[in-house]
Image (cartoon, rainbow, N blue to C red):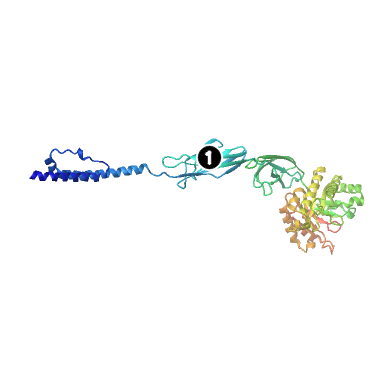
Amino acid sequence: MQKKFLIPLFLLTLILAISSVSASENATDVVDVSEVEVNDISEIEDNSSDNQVLNKEDSSQIAQTADNQLLSDNSSQSVKSKSSVSASKASGYESFATKFVVKLTIDGKAAAGKNILIDVGGKNYTRKTNDDGQAILNIKLSKGTYKVKFTYAGDENVTSSKGSSKIYVYKPMKTKLIADKYLNFRQGLTSLFHVKLVDINSKAIKGQMVTIKVAGKTYKVKTTKNGYAKVFLSLKKGNYKIKCSFSKKQPYLSSSKNVKIKVREKMAKGNGYWLWPKHMASLDLKNLASKGTKHIFLLSDAISSYGKSYVVSWIKRANSYGMKVHIWMLVCYNGDWVSPVRDDGSYKHAFINQKINEAKYYAKISGVAGVHLDYMRYGGTAHKHINAVQSITYIVKKISYAVHSIKPNAIVSVAVMPEPDMMLYYYGQDIPLLSKYADALLPMVYKSAYGKNTNWIKSVTKTFVKQSNGAKIWTGIESYKSENNPVSLSYNALMKDARTAMAGGADGVVIFRIGLTKYLNFKNV
């Protein structure tokens, strides 16, 4: 009876044990009932409690093994960081290196120290990214359009990426340095020298460095907005070669220019008088010279009034006392004002050439030390004419060049108006330009004509000295009270005006005029 009861109980226990093992292994192992061997029912019965304990431990171990296997599978399938490469189109010029930049990011951040392969027209280059994630290739190429491919290979943790762009290479621009042969140089003057840098289309190139070498000195000068590289030179008498060069800089090719200049002898201090011909005969040249007079500006009418031979003889006597005689010629006025340009702004070359030839004629006269240009301006109407300023400057530089070609040491001077703020608008006189070509500028600072006092003489003189690009400023002062009251100023009043001009920086004083003046002792000015 007991055995009959035990057999069903055993079978029930066996079935439950098999079910428990199967569930705990989560169907990973299949257990076949036929593999279970039943030899001794009583033995199984006796160890049933032990089997139950083993089944719980085995179930826990099996579950842990399954979890470890799942973690291992997830680790082998982790997601890589994402890379991206990009580059903008680049452009450059032949004979210069073109800069091509590839940007690498990993998960959106710049990546440093990574190799980028760059293919330009079939040639490969490898560049490493910097701290900004940039791989930079500087490459010289011929004119053309190039397709560029770039690749980042990635690694075990980062995906690869690639991209493409283009490089455009153009022909570089030729350059030229242009010198101004009309510039004037004298010992004792601080004169402006300049060259102009232009491209193949004669367009000015600004902001570029030009090297200028002269007399053992080197100057590096940046070009202005108008393309000029400027330097002020103070040189001794003699001939000089100035070497000018521009080193190529994208997109411009290099250029050079050698300029020969002649530095003329130093001028005497500019103390003197304007002289009308009618006072020539009565003038005491010896007395004038003893008072430090160095220059006499003789009106050109003297030649037509007294003849060339008489004028030459008179000049010779003045020279014997150490005084220089300048022929004082009128340019744009002959009783009426003459504009050197037509209504369309074109130059009246016949008129201009006539004045150049007139100046050359005077320069050839024996003993003549200079040519003085008066009425070298418009009569207050410059603003109504196209190219007014340009035409006045053009005539001065042409006459100066022509006179110096005949007599290298001749002095070319220009009488200018005393209105610094209105010179261009009314008269077409540009002091910075005129002073590059003339040896001396004589502002006619006649205080009575403007209702000014002596201090005005100093102010105007100081302004012109500052504006000059080389020419000496010899201040012109009036010797009489006014045009309406042509009575000579007292000696003391004249001396005060002269000293005031010198205090403004003038290098001399010229008095208008003999015949209506006290003779000033320039040694005391």
Three-letter amino acid code at the position of disc 1: Lys
Question: Residue 306: where, in percent of width, then height?
Answer: 92, 51
Question: What quarter of the picture does the C terminus occupy?
Answer: bottom right
Q: Is residue 383 visible?
A: yes
Query: Residue 163 or 431: which is nearer the viewer?
Result: 163
Question: Residue 302: where, in percent of width, then height?
Answer: 89, 51
- The reply, left or right, for residue 69 in relation to residue 273 is left
Question: What quarter of the picture does the N terminus occupy?
Answer: top left
Q: Residue at (72%, 50%) from the top-left corner?
A: 469
Task: Classify mark 1: helix, strand or loop.
Answer: strand
Query: Residue 197 or 144: which is nearer the viewer?
Result: 144
- The reply, left or right, for residue 267 in relation to residue 106 is right
Query: Residue 100 or 70: which is nearer the viewer?
Result: 70
Task: Using a 10 Å C-alpha cutoff, classify the residue at mark 1 as few (fewer than 14 neighbours), some (14 to 19) or many (20 or more).
Answer: some
Question: Residue 85: where, in percent of width, then height?
Answer: 50, 43
- The reply, left or right, for residue 515 in relation to residue 259 is right
Q: Is residue 488 above or below residue 230?
A: below
Residue at label 1? 149
Q: Is residue 259 above or below residue 461?
A: above
